[in-house]
Structures are given as C-alpha cells and as structure tokens.
Image: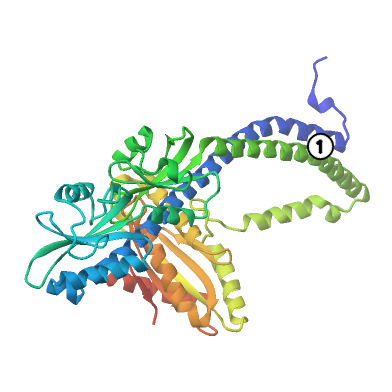
Amino acid sequence: MPFRLRDLRLSIATWMVVVMLLAWLPLLGFAGAATWRLIEWREGDAFSALERRASVTASAVARELASIRSAAKAVVLSQAALSGDLERLHAHCARLVEQDTRLLSISVHNLAGEQLLNTRAAFGTPAADVAEVKTLHASLDGSVDGASALTIEPGSGRLALVLEVPFSTSNGQPLFLHVVVTPQLLNTVLAEQRWPASWLGSVVDQRGTIIARSRDAERYVGQMASATLRERLRGQPTGVYESVTNDQIPVYTASHEVPGTRWWVNVGQPIGTLKSEARDALVGLAVVGALCLGGGLIGALWLARAVAEASRRGDPSRNVVREIGHLQAQLHGAQLDPLTGLAGRRAFLEMGHQLLTAAAHAPGRGLALLFLDLDGFKGLNDRLGHAAGDRALQDVAKVLREHARSDDLTARLGGDEFVLALQAPRDTLDKVSHEVGTRLIQAVSELPHELGCSIGLAIARDGEALDALLERADRAMYEAKRAGRGRVITAT
C-alpha cells in the first residue's frame, strides 16, 4: 500500500517539530548566503571607513601646510619684503623660524637662482651656492602651489620639504621665499589620527617617495613607496584597492590627494585582519544559528502545547497565534522605503509628529526640518537610465545617514526628495542646521554622479503642525533652486 501523508496521525507537537526541522534545510542555505552578505557588508563598511580616514587625513595635512603658508604670506606682504629691505626681511624670517619648531629655515632667491638670504646664516653670509639652490628648485618640479618632493636641505643634509611662495618687491623685482620644513610635522599629523593600531598611514610625494609614515617612520621615510602603491598612485586611484607595504604586508588601501599638492595620503588595513574579523563573524553566526535551532525546538514545543491547550479549552481568543499575527502587522506598518532603507513618507509623518511633540515639551529645545531635492537627477536618469538613478538615490541616502545623529529622523518622501529632521537647543538650532545642510551639499557634490542638491530649511514654530512645517521647508527649497542651486535657504 503506497505511503500517503494524510494517513499520518501525529500530535501537534510532533508536526511542529517536523516542520521546523524541514525548514532548517533551506535555512542552512539562507544562512550561508547571509554569511557571505554579512562579510561583504563588513568589508564595505571597512572600505568606507578607509576612504573616510584617507580623506580626513589629507584635509588635516592640507590644513597644516596652509597654516605654514599663511605665515609665509604674511612675511612676503611685510614692509621689509615689499621695500626690498633684505636685512630687515632676514630678521623677520629668523624670528619666525625661532618661534615655529616645524620650520628648518627660510631663504629668499631671485630668478637667477642666487640666494639673497638664509636664516641658517647671518645676513650677508653666503649659505648655499647656486648648485645647491638648483637642487632645491628641482625638488619643486611637478609641484602644485609650490609644495616640493622630499629633498635635502642645502647646507645641513637634513631631509626636508619646501614650500615656495613667490612675491615681488615694490619696484617689481620677482623673488621666491622658500620655507623649508621638517617631514616630522606630517608624522605628527598621522599620529593625531585615531585609527586602529593595525592600520598603516603614509604620505607619498609626487616622485613616489615616502615623506611620512605612522609606523617606523625613521626606517622608511626617504625610501620609495612599494611598487604596487606607486603604480596605483600614477593612475589617480579611487576607491579601495589591494597593495603591499614596504614591509611586505598585504593591505587594503584607500588613497586621497592632499589638496593643493601632488602628495597622496594612503591609509591601509591589513587584509589578514579583515579576513580574521570575517571568520569571527562566521563563527559567531554559527553559534547564534545553533542557539536559534535549540530555541526553535523549545519554542515549537511550547507553541504546540499552547495551541493544544487553547483548543482543548475551546477559546480561540486565548491562542498565542493571534498575538504573533498582531505583532507582524505592527512590524509591516513601519513603511520603510524599499530602495534606500530610509523612512518612507507615511513613517516620516508618524515619527515626525512625535518629534515635533517632544520638541514642544522640551524647554529650550527646537526642531528644524531640512528639505533636500537633488539637482540634475532627471538628466542623470535620461543619460544613464533608472538603474543609475537608483544607485544615486541609495548613495544620497547613505550620505544622509552618515550626517545624521542617532536621534535625528531621515526619510525619503518620494522621487529625489529627502528630509532630515533634527533637534538642538533653540539658540543654536539655526546655526547647527545650516552647518548640517552645508555639509550635506558638499557630500552630495562629491558623489560620483555629478549631482548637486538644494535645501530648504524651516525652524518649527510654537504650535505649528508637521504639514505646515514641511510645506514651508518645501517652498524654501524651491527658493534655493531659483537662487542658483547648491545652497541652503531658510524659510521666512
């Protein structure tokens, strides 16, 4: 007699255990796929962190150079420089070198390469011949805005970097101020970056020479960067790539050019460390899976018992399945935007009303709403298609999440319209909101989609409804577009 499933007479508990065990087989496949996705997500997060740190460090290096350049420009604009009084100019430069430990020396040269003064020697005393000055000039070959490659300071033999500031005296004579700085100042900038101990940071000049390093600087500064790194830097790298350090450690590397120079900041994470973290995540997932399996068995038996007990009492209202269904309905009501993962319009209206009410009952607190609309999004869709548009929307959503705090509310209202609701003290709310809006505009413009954004800002009034606040922010956004786009306009 053939076997038929309906001939089985099993208890509820047995059926639930059988169903759970059968469900475990596809769950194993799902868990494997989920594990790979988890590893990819972790790698993606790690890569994003590397890129952010490279960009932040490059900006820090640029700020350090800008502060030195500002001091140098103050020198060339002094009365001594403009009048061509070299003796007074020498005294001015000497005081600056004495006060600023980052500076090794300052010298002035004419177009012929003749050195007119140098703080390493008393005024009127030759400190370097023309050949040495030509060596210094050669280090500036290929520089941008006068930032040299690593060189040797004439006369002292020390490793140095040169910042060149051209100027003219009042009688029109063209001269060059050369500020010679120690590479140690870049090592200091790298040391101030609070990245994990296993990461490695370096700064490489336009010739591929290491001019700063977060570890073993004494050993590697002055050496050429590894061949793999130099090859990538020649191609103006973007994103994260694999390279090998000078001490033969394979790393994932992100590079960012230092603004105003042809130097590159490189931040690397050992590949072995990241793979180890992925293995730890896999082991953790396996442990959690085993616990879930055991918990599922216990839960199945408990649920079967509860269902059987309710059936025996003939009271369906006390069956726990009803509560589970109610919980599922609540979860589905969250209404997240499926493309970006941000809150959708319905969820924003619900949660935004709660934020507005909370701000109204918090003394000294206020609520601001930033209404963001992309500039150039339709053209992107027309040129590259909707798939490219969807990727752009996802990247913009990522920018919003990165610039929002944990208690802020971000949402996509539809199309290319986004909102960010944030709370802050009333006396700083307008300033904070403008700063956030400005950072959002900058971050969106740096995405690889050639997009911009215009932002309307509205500060919630006492007793104002969310719809009215949203409408004011929307109008301010259109004012920002009419005013030229790429700006924040506050609703009146």
As drawn, the residue found furthest toward the right would be: 313
Residue 364 picture location, percent across and down? 57, 83
* Residue at 55% in and 47% down: 197
Q: Quadrant of residue 98?
A: bottom left
Colour scheme of the rendered structure: rainbow
Secondary structure at badge 1 equals helix
Whether residue 40 is visible to the viewer of this picture, yes or no, is: yes
Q: How many numbered badges does the structure rendering display?
A: 1
Q: Is residue 361 above or below residue 267?
A: below
Residue 48 locus on image (x, y percent): 47, 48
Looking at the picture, which amino acid does disc 1 mark? Met
| Residue closest to the eye, 46 or 461 | 46
- Quarter of the view holding residue 99: bottom left
- At which x and y percent is residue 355? 58, 72
| On-image quarter of the C terminus | bottom left
Reading the image, the residue beneath label 1 is 16
| For residue 454, side relative to residue 1 (left or right) | left
Q: Is residue 363 left or right of residue 162?
A: right
Dot 1 alpha-carbon crowd within 10 angstroms: few under 14, some 14 to 19, many 20 or more: some
Is residue 209 positioned above or below 416 on the image?
above
On the picture, is 156 further left or further right than 46?
Answer: left
Question: Considering the image in quadrants, where does the N terminus appear?
Answer: top right
Residue 253: x and y in percent read: 43, 41
Determine the residue located farthest toward the top in the rendered image: 1
Q: Is residue 393 among what the camera can see?
A: no
Name the residue located 14 percent from the left edge and 62 percent from the top edge. Answer: 175
Q: Residue at x 88, y 29 (%)?
A: 9
Name the residue at 25% across, 71% down. 92
On the image, which quarter does residue 278 sit in? top right
